Image: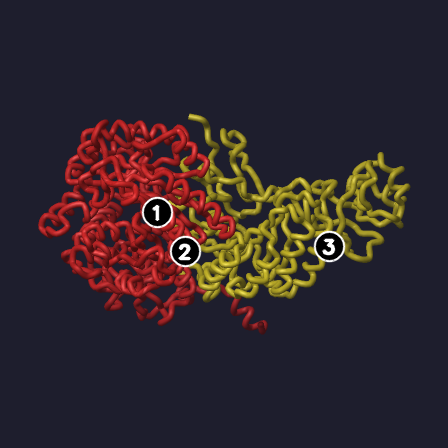
Chain colours: A yellow, B red
């Protein structure tokens, strides 16, 4: 696990700052990590023109000398690196917005959502935060390296931005034309054809919309997302996206309420949504709402393996591109290993003590470090 | 939202809050058939199907389905019933329907040019060829060929296939050569996706011909009826034996044009019916990975004799089934080999994609997908139509290449044929469970019954297709785990080729 939030003591920073951590030794940037005393000369040279992040290992006398410099001191810098883009709040709170060596970076659009999924890992909040995050994201976008391969857009429900969502996709195209963009959305807003039409005019072919569909039966889907008519809206949204040549992926979260009709869902996808470019079946992250709803959600992966195998093999046999996310190899039948991907974000990924002796550790995507409950059947695999 | 309503929205509700609790629902259009003692098959216009226990349809019609049952969910998800008079996903249904029928979008795409009736074979099932006869009499004239090509370019289809038939078209190679060069010339301004196919017996090849076919990327469709004795018995030729010549021809074509540009068709004759396995083995031996166990052409034999025909249809179905079983066994042993008719039907059954197979579609392939320019300049609605004309029945002659495009493709005859080409409106088809996967054949029914629709209980076309559909669905019902992995590999292979 990597922590994306830390806090220190702030001095002389009056406004929130969004900046990329520079390299002191090559004189690049104006925000620097200071972990030892060897950089004194450079710090003095830069003076008040830069911002310094002083590690908590540095004693107070040292930071005292620079008390009128812009800084956050007494900081745990373990998870910060040169190249990271961070936001410094006026109370010394530091959020990592972008990590240079990670392929799991996202723009966070909002905490709001028009659904209320029973297994939401990041429960929605009801305050209007769209402007707040818009400001952060537009500043962040300008700083992200142009050679970045992939960037997510997530929330909450990003399309709650409305017309500004189209602007965001246009901005992605102009700021990061080479970057693959992966938008996580429930797709309900795309039932409005004019939104999708406007999106299509941007012509950003790097964008893929990852949209959840939890059942072929509307009643089950609507129950899982806790919103009436959500299934119909998502289906119409998927059709509008196809009509306007947008790229789509289907995401299915595996739990007690979704597993029983997985084979029917697979057939439904092939019959009704054969245009989607990828289908991902995803293990449950046991956090957020899931904790409160554990009784109606938790199921051992072994107990849904029959349905999962039938669904995955059906779609694969019809030439569809299928993946399994978030399940360690030891919980999957070997016939399904070829569909397994290292999907858990690097900063959330964990391996257990048990895993250290596993023969397929290198190939395994591990487990959610964020999960408050894991299968008790995780076992190291030895070569027979 | 008011804060109260937000609070209400954020509180978790039970499943029944989102599902209907009353057993009222509306029927959407579907058709059904008793598949076996235990099973019924339900199919809708979109090709969605359900295999359900006997008695289910009655329960559905009487609205005696428990809304919390898996069956209810299957029926809703499959667009068989709806909780509202107009289904909320009617736009999705419309798109699926439009997609299935989109083979119609371009109108006529297959243009058959009968460049000569002359042939060096005298196959007994052939209605049209002349072994003797002069070029002047039996080859198409350059003037008529030119007019035919101009008609072809009037078609709105973005894809055009020129198929050269005969007789043996390579005996009139100068006409093929002219047609291809002329079409390419004209296509500079039309910009169509233009393809060429020659249906040849592969016994008339020269290096010059091969060079030309290679340059213009022509596909070869040749005839191989099975093992040597069967092939030679079906396809008599004076002088050398046909089989050896065909194999030699196939090898020459493959060497110059590439293996994937040469395909084979076989004609099932009475003699063939005893040798499904041997026919398939021959195809395997000569490096083919597919065979088309083509239904017997009703123009070949016994057209006028119902009783004999009936017998032949049963025998054909036995032939098809043993052939398919043998092919399934081959696949189980790891040999990838497909039966083309089955692949066409499986694609219609399992996918929503358009399957434009001219012999089994609705509206029928006549004019909508295919047109034939005959050697004498007359234009016919299909290959079978011009064969019918050889016995002086000109019902499906649409005009002459000298006539206007409109009068040929949209004239009175075309309209009359269209009236009888839509299976959805034909007696006996309109309520058939297999309607969505089947097609209309006005030419066959006209030939047998004297009207373009015919009588379903007596129609061999119907009996044959019903037989195949029943067989395939029973396989899917009773031997799913065994056959589905094989069938799906065929569908996947076929979809990849079309992509």
Residue B232 in picture, x, y percent from top left: 20, 31
Residue A295 in picture, x, y percent from top left: 44, 54
Do tags 3 and 1 sit on the same chain? no
Give the residue displayed 22% in from the left and 28% down from the top.
Answer: B239
Residue B293 in the image: above or below residue A161: above
Instruction: Report the quarter where the C terminus of chain A lies.
Output: top left
* Mark 2 secondary-structure assignment: helix
Do tags 3 and 2 sit on the same chain? yes
Instruction: Report the quarter where the N terminus of chain A lies.
Output: top right
Instruction: Give me the chain letter of mark 3.
Output: A
The picture quadrant where one finds residue B233 is top left
Residue sticking out furthest to the top: A384
Q: Which residue is mark 1?
A: B141
- Of circles 3 and 2, which is in front? 2
**CA–CA distance in space, label 3 to label 2:** 40 Å
Do tags 1 and 2 sit on the same chain? no
Residue B73 in picture, x, y percent from top left: 34, 60
Q: Which residue is mark 2?
A: A272
**CA–CA distance in space, label 1 to label 2:** 50 Å
| Of callouts 3 and 2, the N-terminal one | 3
Residue B300 in the image: above or below residue B205: below
Instruction: Give me the chain letter of mark 1.
Output: B
Seen from the viewer's position, the closer of residues B496 and B417 is B417
Q: Which residue is mark 3?
A: A139
Residue B257 in the image: above or below residue A195: above
Residue B5 in the image: above or below residue B258: below
């Amino acid at each position: 696990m990597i922590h994306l939030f830390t806090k220190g003591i702030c001095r002389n920073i009056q406004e929130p700052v969004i900046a990329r951590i520079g390299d002191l030794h090559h004189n690049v940037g104006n925000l620097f990590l200071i972990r030892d005393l060897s950089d004194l000369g450079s710090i003095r040279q830069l003076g008040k023109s830069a911002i310094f992040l002083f590690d908590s290992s540095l004693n107070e006398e040292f930071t005292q000398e620079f008390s009128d410099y812009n800084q956050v001191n007494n900081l745990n810098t373990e998870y910060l690196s040169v190249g990271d883009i961070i936001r410094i709040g006026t109370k010394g709170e530091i959020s990592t917005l972008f990590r240079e060596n990670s392929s799991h970076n996202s723009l966070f659009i909002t905490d709001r959502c028009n659904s209320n999924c029973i297994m939401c890992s990041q429960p929605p909040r009801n305050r209007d935060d769209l402007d707040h995050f818009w400001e952060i994201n537009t500043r962040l976008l300008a700083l992200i390296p142009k050679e970045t391969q992939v960037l997510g857009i997530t929330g909450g429900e990003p399309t709650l931005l409305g017309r500004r969502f189209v602007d965001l996709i246009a901005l992605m195209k102009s700021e990061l034309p080479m970057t693959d963009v992966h938008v996580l959305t429930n797709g309900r807003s795309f039932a409005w054809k004019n939104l999708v039409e406007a999106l299509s005019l941007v012509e950003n072919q790097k964008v893929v919309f990852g949209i959840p569909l939890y059942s072929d039966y509307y009643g089950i889907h609507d129950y899982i997302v806790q919103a009436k008519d959500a299934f119909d809206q998502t289906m119409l949204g998927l059709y509008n996206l196809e009509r306007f040549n947008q790229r789509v992926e289907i995401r299915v979260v595996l739990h007690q309420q979704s597993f029983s009709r997985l084979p029917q869902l697979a057939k439904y996808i092939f019959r009704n949504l054969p245009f989607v470019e990828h289908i991902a079946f995803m293990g449950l992250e046991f956090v957020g709402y899931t904790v409160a709803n554990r009784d109606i959600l938790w199921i051992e992966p072994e107990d849904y393996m029959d349905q999962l195998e039938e669904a995955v093999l059906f779609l694969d046999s019809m030439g569809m591109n299928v993946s399994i996310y978030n399940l360690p190899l030891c919980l999957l039948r070997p016939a399904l290993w070829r569909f397994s991907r290292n999907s858990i974000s690097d900063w959330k990924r964990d391996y257990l003590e048990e895993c250290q002796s596993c023969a397929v550790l290198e190939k395994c995507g591990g487990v959610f470090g964020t999960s408050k409950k894991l299968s008790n059947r995780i076992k190291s695999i030895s070569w027979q | 939202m008011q804060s109260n309503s937000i609070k209400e929205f954020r509180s978790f509700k039970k499943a029944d809050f989102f599902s209907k609790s009353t057993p009222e629902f509306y029927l959407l259009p579907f058709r059904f058939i008793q598949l076996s003692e235990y099973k019924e098959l339900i199919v809708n216009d979109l090709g969605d199907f359900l295999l359900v226990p006997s008695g289910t349809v009655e329960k559905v019609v009487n609205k005696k389905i428990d809304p919390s049952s898996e069956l209810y969910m299957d029926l809703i998800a499959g667009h068989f019933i709806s909780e509202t008079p107009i289904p909320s996903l009617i736009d999705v249904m419309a798109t699926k329907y439009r997609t299935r029928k989109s083979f119609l979008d371009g109108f006529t795409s297959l243009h058959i040019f009968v460049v000569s009736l002359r042939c060096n074979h005298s196959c007994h099932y052939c209605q049209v060829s002349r072994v003797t006869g002069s070029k002047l009499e039996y080859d198409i004239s350059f003037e008529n060929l030119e007019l035919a090509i101009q008609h072809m370019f009037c078609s709105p289809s973005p894809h055009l296939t020129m198929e050269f038939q005969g007789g043996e078209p390579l005996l009139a190679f100068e006409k093929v050569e002219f047609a291809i060069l002329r079409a390419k010339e004209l296509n500079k301004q039309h910009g169509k996706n233009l393809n060429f196919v020659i249906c040849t017996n592969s016994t008339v090849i020269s290096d010059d011909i091969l060079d030309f076919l290679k340059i213009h990327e022509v596909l070869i469709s040749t005839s191989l009826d099975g093992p040597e004795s069967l092939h030679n018995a079906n396809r008599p030729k004076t002088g050398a034996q046909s089989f050896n010549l065909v194999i030699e021809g196939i090898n020459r074509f493959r060497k110059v044009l590439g293996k994937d540009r040469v395909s084979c068709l076989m004609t099932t004759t009475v003699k063939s019916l005893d040798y499904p396995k041997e026919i398939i083995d021959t195809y395997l031996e000569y490096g083919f990975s597919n065979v088309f166990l083509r239904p017997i052409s009703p123009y070949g034999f016994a057209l006028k004799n119902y009783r004999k025909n009936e017998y032949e249809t049963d025998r054909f179905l036995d032939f098809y089934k043993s052939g398919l079983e043998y092919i399934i066994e081959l696949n189980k042993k790891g040999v990838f080999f497909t039966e083309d008719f089955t692949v066409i039907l499986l694609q219609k059954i399992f996918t929503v994609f358009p399957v434009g197979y001219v012999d089994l579609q609705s509206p029928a392939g006549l004019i909508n997908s295919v047109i034939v320019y005959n050697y004498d300049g007359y234009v016919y609605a299909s290959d079978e139509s011009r064969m019918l004309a050889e016995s002086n029945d000109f019902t499906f002659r649409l005009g002459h290449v000298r006539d206007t495009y409109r009068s040929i493709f949209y004239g009175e005859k075309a309209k009359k044929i269209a009236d009888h080409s839509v299976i959805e409106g034909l007696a006996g088809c309109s309520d058939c469970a297999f309607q969505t996967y089947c097609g209309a054949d006005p030419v066959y029914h006209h030939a047998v019954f004297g009207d373009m629709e015919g009588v379903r209980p007596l129609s061999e076309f119907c009996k044959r297709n019903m037989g195949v559909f029943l067989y395939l669905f029973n396989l899917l019902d009773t031997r799913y785990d065994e056959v589905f992995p094989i069938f799906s590999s065929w569908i996947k292979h076929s979809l990849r080729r079309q992509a």
